[in-house]
Amino acid sequence: MSSHQQPARPKSRKHIPDAVKDVMARVSFQPGVRVADIVAAGQGSSSALYRSRAEIKVDDKVKTRSMSSGRPSPFPPIVMEYALALFHFRPAFYLDEVVGLIKRFHGYTVNKSTVCRWLKNNNVTRKRLTRPAREQDGHRVLRWTLMMGQFDASQLCFADETHADRRTGVRKNGYSPEGTRAVSSTFFVRGKRFTLLPAMSQDGIFAPWVVEGSVNGERFEWWLEHQCLPLMNPYPGPQSVLVMDNASTHKGARVRELVEEAGCILIYLPPYSPELNPIELAFSVDKRSLMRTAVIEESDLMHAAKNSITSEGAKNMFAHCGFI
């Protein structure tokens, strides 16, 4: 053998299904068929074939054998279950924190890679945290969610405000050679501040209104009476249930009166529950669209409101919040 020639690696064992073993063994009983011929065809070893023949002679079938699951874990199952429970009750744990807790309370030294494998094997993945407010009342949210089950998604409309100025369009990331900063000059003074006040159904954004400055109760009631409600329908028609958060501007003296005069239903979200409002997701899309604009003007905000959200996108946002 040449000094550069690598020795031949032993062939790895090939798993042969029990049904194939059964056929091979029965064929080997036929006159003129030799075990060596079957083995030469590449289907297992002679010892395995003789074992299958013996099993058929005794039980008329090949014995089922379970596949090896590899080297057994040096840790008892409760250690893995403990790690999974830690992530279940506190998803923000770092791997080394879990390793330390296992050592402290179970006495085992576990590698972070082992914890990663446990997570992967149990379909637990790392993702961005959703952060509901600590002040949120879980029981109240549950009752509200059950109550909303009486409405069809086509009946629901959501309203809220969002704000933008020329710093809203500032991009957060850029490219530069490795080891150097990515530098881009930007505004440090906000400039004009605009407020976008739209409503949203499962078909998309409607009744968008942009004003310079903030929206107070008087402005909100004007928008509600002259822009939003004329595009809604009496209950139980489509777009007949208006859902808003508990902002003080949304709870003016005439708000409920205006909604009920239009034959619609007014519902307020549970406190501290923006994750139940699909329009919050729409605002995120609008602001990503505004990052393509160097300076934010009133027309930019109106264009983003009208064109950023498709009907399909709106339905996906409703589904994300549990209304479809």
Image: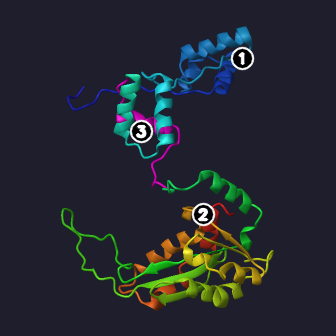
Q: Label 2: few (<14), some or many (≥20) within 10 Å?
A: many
What is the quadrant of residue 153 in the picture? bottom right
Residue placed under numbered mark 3 in the picture:
116
Numbered disc 2: secondary structure: helix
Question: At 61% across and 20% down in the image, what residue appears?
Answer: 65
Location of residue 71 in the rendering, given as x and y in whole percent from the top left corner: 44, 23
Residue placed under numbered mark 2 in the picture:
276
* Whether label 1 touches label 2, CB < 8 Å: no
Kind of residue indicated by mark 1: Lys
Kind of residue indicated by mark 3: Cys
- The residue nearer to you, when weighing 262 against 44, is 262
* Whether label 1 touches label 3, CB < 8 Å: no
Q: Which residues are magenta?
A: 108-130
Q: Quadrant of the N terminus?
A: top left
| Cα separation between marks 3 and 2 | 32 Å
Q: Is residue 13 left or right of residue 7?
A: right
